[in-house]
Image (tube, helix red, strand yellow):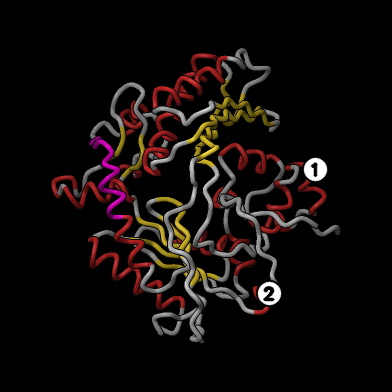
Amino acid sequence: MAIPLRSEAAPGDHGAEDKGPQEQDRPRKIIHVDMDAFFASVEQRDFPELRGLPVAVGGAGGRGVVAAASYEARMFGVHSAMPSLTAKRLCPDLVFRPTRFEVYRAVSEQIRAIFHRFTELVEPLSLDEAYLDVTEDRAGIGSATGIAREIRRLIAEETQLTASAGVSYNKFLAKLASDQNKPDGLCVIRPGEGEAFVATLPVRRFHGIGPRGAEKMARLGIATGADLHAKEPDWLRAHFGSFGETLWRAARGIDHRPVRAHRIRKSIGGERTFFEDLSAPDELRDALERIIAIVWDRIADKQARGRTVTLKLKFRDFTLMTRARSLPRAIAGRAEFAALSRALLEEQLPLPMPIRLLGLTLSALDGGHEPNAAPAPPSTAQLALF
């Protein structure tokens, strides 16, 4: 059996792996905290009349997109990135609320302040989730699990919101664990348990594997992590290209990436994998409008300024095409971002074959540092218990 030679990021997070020897000798203690239905939960907190009702945050109009859905709405199949018209058909009583990013950002900063009481090694992924490295026991609690419990308690007490947390020895497993007992749950994967835990999961739970990827795996006889584990690296590379190496590691619960508390943001984007391949120009244009709305919300949330828009197309046969357009200055606003995005798509029509994925990215950002504190020198206290 040929072992993959190249280190790959775990699915859903494309940072480079840290292969330093000290990480091999001492397991990290990683917590992934994920707020439960964050935007919708903030709306239900601030407007008590919405509690218990199916709530969607986003535009309710013809080209509106669901940015977040409450758990009551999710019971009807409503989810983020869904067209609002589709969501309304699934749940006729759905209550739409406009996005209030200034409120969500303020709550997010409140939650991050709680994280920093326990560690300076905090890597936010978005407003509502973050990785924490608590290998050094700054608070003297004694275990990563105890820290996760205390963080969740403080979030509930100080924000009246619930969070789910995953605790493990690497980022990939911690993120999987945080999804395991949602909402308002805690899951711990201890050293030595990762490979067995991953084996029980459907591959659709692996971050980075979308509906179409799961369908392809099903056709190849792969339904669970155990099925994936049984495949040889060369076989995975033959069917999935370089992503096959990532899958090989994921099936074994391997991930050596550190939590990066101060990182440079190179781009902001979003993409959507479709349940059915798209080829009709009008379908493609409608899909693009929904992605424009989602990505621009993220750009506005980060108050980012960039010069380059990139269109990403993944075809039915998994071949990838990217097309970009750059300006000599920062893009002026949403209208210009949308115009450049539409022009990039129109230049490719008609497409040579249907696509399974469409994405947009803004890059060549001004500045680019994430607003996180730099890591503090580690303390001498080590966690005795996981």
Residue in front for this viewpoint, 167 or 122: 122
Sequence-earlier tag: 1 or 2 = 2
The amino acid sitting under disc 2 is Gln
State which region is magenta: 94-107
The residue indicated by pointer 2 is: 24
How far apart marks 1 and 2 lie (CA) works out to: 30 Å
Magenta run includes residue 288: no
Q: Image height check: is 333 above or below 17?
A: above
Q: Residue at x 68, y 52 (%)?
A: 247
Select label 1 or label 2 by which is in front.
2
Type of the residue with mark 1: Ala
Which residue bears the numbered disc 1?
A: 238
Q: Residue 320 appears at what percent x and percent y? A: 68, 31
Q: Decide: marks 1, 2 in contact (CB < 8 A)?
A: no
Q: How many marks?
A: 2
Percent across and percent down for residue 275 are: 53, 32
Q: Is 98 included in the stretch rendered in magenta?
A: yes
Percent from the top left, x then y, of residue 299?
A: 42, 38
* x 48%, y 86%: residue: 381
Q: Secondary structure at mark 2?
A: helix
Circle 1 SS class: helix
**Residue 350 circle label:** none
Image check: 59 left or right of 167? left
Quadrant of the image occupied by residue 371: bottom left
Q: Residue at x 14, y 50 (%)?
A: 48
The answer to whether residue 351 shows anywhere in this view is yes
Circle 2: is it few (<14), some (14-19), or many (20+) Cα within 10 Å? few
Residue at the extreme left of the image, as rendered:
49
Determine the residue positioned at 29% across, 39% down.
57
